[in-house]
Image (tube, rainbow, N blue to C red):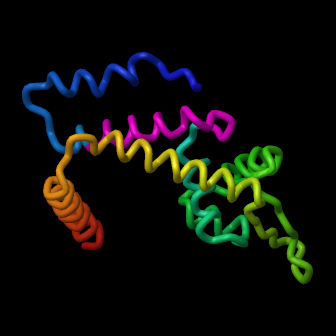
């Protein structure tokens, strides 16, 4: 299990004691805590958000070139290359040069990578279940409605 600084673990607890919390504070701490709980079961994959984002992008879009992967995951090419080296060493992906254009390298998830993705998805569902413990179906629906509204507001503003 990765060792996280105690400060990271204390921060959400302090938020619960904050007399004037903002919704964004809860959203950030929930997301960070959720991510730590997922990563704790898969320490060999690394803890970086970029690594996890890249792995998930590949699982959903097998056979991207490294350049496409970098763009889709919002990462730089050197970051993608370093993470792919680790993923390849761990047996999660394989790289295949294009037969016609050797400058292009396609990245594919291996069976071991697919299995790991299924394990991560199962763990996400477990943590989601923990997170929603004691939340009624109507509260869950209302929460989703409000979160969707918040996201739409931010997207609308970003698109201006």
Q: Is residue 123 magenta?
A: no
Location of residue 140 with respect to 41 vertically, above or below = below
Q: Residue at x 50, y 22 (%)?
A: 4
Chief secondary structure of the magenta span? helix
The spot of residue 136 in percent (x, y) is: 17, 51
Residue 19 picture quarter: top left
From this viewpoint, which residue is outermost toward the top?
6
107 relative position to 12: left or right: right
64 relative position to 31: left or right: right
Q: Quadrant of the C terminus?
A: bottom left
- Please state which of residues 119 and 158 is positioned toward the viewer in this rendering: 119
Q: Which residues are magenta?
A: 27-46
Location of residue 144 with respect to 100 vertically, above or below = above
Q: Residue at x 22, y 60 (%)?
A: 144
Q: Residue at x 54, y 32 (%)?
A: 40
The spot of residue 122 in percent (x, y) is: 52, 50
17 relative position to 83: left or right: left
Q: Residue at x 63, y 38 (%)?
A: 46
From this viewpoint, which residue is outermost toward the bottom?
100
Residue 71 picture quarter: bottom right
């Amino acid at each position: 299990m990765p060792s996280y600084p105690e400060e990271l673990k204390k921060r959400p607890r302090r938020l619960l004691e904050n007399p004037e919390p903002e919704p964004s504070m809860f959203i950030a701490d929930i997301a960070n805590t959720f991510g730590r709980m997922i990563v704790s079961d898969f320490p060999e994959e690394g803890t970086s958000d970029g690594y996890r984002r890249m792995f998930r992008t590949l699982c959903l879009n097998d056979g991207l070139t490294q350049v496409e992967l970098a763009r889709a995951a919002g990462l730089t090419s050197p970051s993608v290359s370093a993470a792919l080296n680790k993923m390849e060493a761990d047996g999660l992906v394989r790289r295949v040069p294009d037969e016609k254009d050797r400058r292009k390298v396609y990245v594919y998830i291996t069976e071991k990578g697919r299995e790991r993705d299924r394990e991560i998805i199962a763990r996400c569902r477990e943590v989601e279940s923990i997170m929603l413990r004691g939340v009624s179906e109507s509260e869950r629906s209302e929460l989703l409605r409000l979160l969707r509204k918040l996201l739409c507001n931010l997207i609308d503003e970003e698109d201006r």
